[in-house]
Image: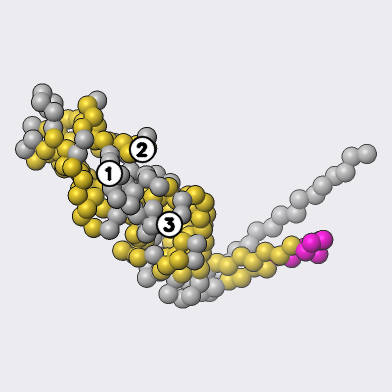
Amino acid sequence: MVLAIKKPSFRWNPDDRAVNQLRLSLPTLPAVSLIVRAGSAVPVIESVVNAASGAAGFAANGIASIYGARLAGAQVAVDGVAVTVLYTSASQINFDAPAMATGAATLTVTAPSGETASAPVQVAAVQPGIFTAMAAGQTLIVYATGLGPAGAAPLVFIGATPVQPAVLPVAPGVWQLNAPIPAGVSGAQPVLISVSLAHSNTVRVTIP
């Protein structure tokens, strides 16, 4: 005997009110209920990424970005713990992720209206990302995030050459790496950071 399973479908078109709510209930055992909220006062989370590299997720003690809609003036919490918001606009939030447990977590955005949106995120111990890099004399200066709580000893690759940099804290979640430029290296060079086998985004720097 073959049972035909029908999958009902419908289209919901919220109007222009600040908040629209849709409630779905199925009288099954156990009962299933789903509430969906949308509207001009409800924030939307599209992605949560490393603020420097754009990689999904973020590192504890790093700077992260949330992209979405209706985010201006919002507050952020990770697993119910409020974090420091550094910047907001209608489509972006930057925040400082404090020391926290790594692994799966839930990020919640609360808009000034009181409406919330949540998304699952992955928190890493390290997730290096480069904001910018520049040559200053015989030193390559790199500004980065995601190096862990104490700026875990990174390697800076200038081209194919690994260099051990001096690591200086600049602000919570932001580090300055001063790497000596190897003799004979010049021209446009790819630069990346490696920390505990995790690699950053690659930027290109012209070395005189």
User: Is residue 67 found inside the magenta-colored segment of the image?
Assistant: no
Q: Position of residue 184 (x, y in %)?
A: 10, 23
Residue at x 74% of width, y 62% of height: 32
What main secondary structure does the magenta stretch of the protein show?
loop
- The residue that disc 2 covers is 196
Instruction: Indicate left or right for 48 with 5 as reference.
Output: left
As drawn, the label of residue 1 is none
Mark 1 or 2: in front is: 2
> Spatial distance from mark 2 to mark 3, Cα to Cα?
18 Å
Q: Which residues are magenta?
A: 24-31
Which amino acid, by three-letter code, is at mark 3? Met
Residue at x 75% of width, y 54% of height: 8
- The residue that disc 1 covers is 130
- The residue that disc 3 covers is 100
Quarter of the rendering occupied by the C terminus:
top left
Of 70 and 181, the residue lying toward us: 181
Of 78 and 204, the residue lying toward us: 78
